[in-house]
Image (spheres, rainbow, N blue to C red):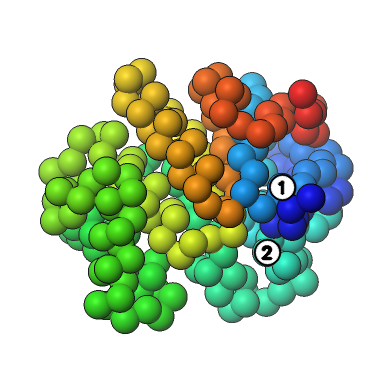
Amino acid sequence: MNRVMLSAQGISKSYLQGQNELPILRDLAMTVHEGEMVAIVGKSGSGKSTLLNLLAGLDHPDSGEVTLADCCWQKTGERERDRVRNHSLGFVYQFHHLLPEFSALENVAMPLRIAGMSSAKARVVALDLLAKVGLSDRAKHRPNQLSGGERQRVAIARGLANSPAVVLMDEPTGNLDVETASEVRDLIKTLSRSASTAFVIVTHDPSFAEYADRVLTLTNGKLEDH
Ligand SMILES: Nc1ncnc2c1ncn2[C@@H]1O[C@H](COP(=O)(O)OP(=O)(O)OP(=O)(O)O)[C@@H](O)[C@H]1O
């Protein structure tokens, strides 16, 4: 069995609604191995984004622990959490969140520069990633000079820039038309097969289920495997 890259155990999370507690996640557990593609589905409001934020260590559970690439968010200081996020975690959101004043190349190179790579080396790695997502000829384009699908492909290249242990994706095809969504899905599939990176993909897109190694449904605050 491959190495465990992400583990969540006993995760509970509630929000306050006025005076009342609104339980969202209840003693949830999940484990993701190196190179696995796991899709998380569930009704709107079931807590998928809440879970992703906890997996990324961006929010705190009321109880339980999340460990990503051997770092337990609950036992680590903010500085170390930032370092692990920079080195071991990639994000891809429904809306690309690319920096508008920077080119595609600079956007992809950004996490590498933040992690301390030289500008020249980051450029080489970013160009290679843009080639992998089929955008070599768009490297100098700024986000507003790219199509929606191209922007999302740049965001995927950026998410993979640091060769992270885990990439978390929140509705990566949610904002795309059917055809473009299918292209982006195929790209994610190809990338996931060629790397040891684990992908956790929150999606309403049923086609991901065909590609994923496992589909987990978030219901009543827990994940059901099927
Ligand atoms: N900061 C908050 N304070 C209070 N309630 C919140 C907060 N964030 C989320 N919620 C509530 O928690 C529930 C889960 O929200 P979440 O965004 O995790 O669901 P989701 O499954 O990602 O939904 P969708 O598929 O619609 O994006 C929702 O009922 C939401 O209203």
Q: Position of residue 161 (x, y in %)?
A: 41, 61
183 versus 145 height, above or below: above
From where the camera sits, is residue 50 visible? no
Characterize the local packing of mark 2: few (<14), some (14-19) or many (20 or more) Cα atoms within 10 angstroms.
some
Between residue 46 and residue 136, name the one nearer to us: 136
From where the camera sits, is residue 194 visible? yes
**Disc on the earlier residue, 1 or 2:** 1
Tag shown at residue 161: none
Residue pictured at 60% horizontal, 24% vertical: 209
Three-letter code for the amino acid on which mark 1 is drawn: Val
Q: Position of residue 115 (x, y in %)?
A: 44, 75
Q: Secondary structure at mark 2?
A: loop
154 vs 186, left or right, is left
Which image quadrant: the C terminus? top right
Between residue 12 and residue 159, name the one nearer to us: 159
Residue pictured at 39% horizontal, 47% vertical: 156
Characterize the local packing of mark 1: few (<14), some (14-19) or many (20 or more) Cα atoms within 10 angstroms.
many
131 versus 171 height, above or below: below
Residue pictured at 82% horizontal, 44% vertical: 29
Three-letter code for the amino acid on which mark 2 is drawn: Ala
130 versus 183 height, above or below: below
| Tag 2 residue | 69
Residue pictured at 78% horizontal, 44% vertical: 30
139 vs 116, left or right, is left
Q: What's the CA distance linking mark 1 and mark 2? A: 10 Å
| Tag 1 residue | 32
Q: Position of residue 39 (x, y in %)?
A: 62, 33
Between residue 177 and residue 198, name the one nearer to us: 198
Q: How many marks?
A: 2
Find residue 80 and report its image quarter.
bottom right
Q: Position of residue 47 (x, y in %)?
A: 67, 35
Asked if the beta carbon under badge 2 is closer than 8 A to the nearest atom of ligand 1, the reply is no
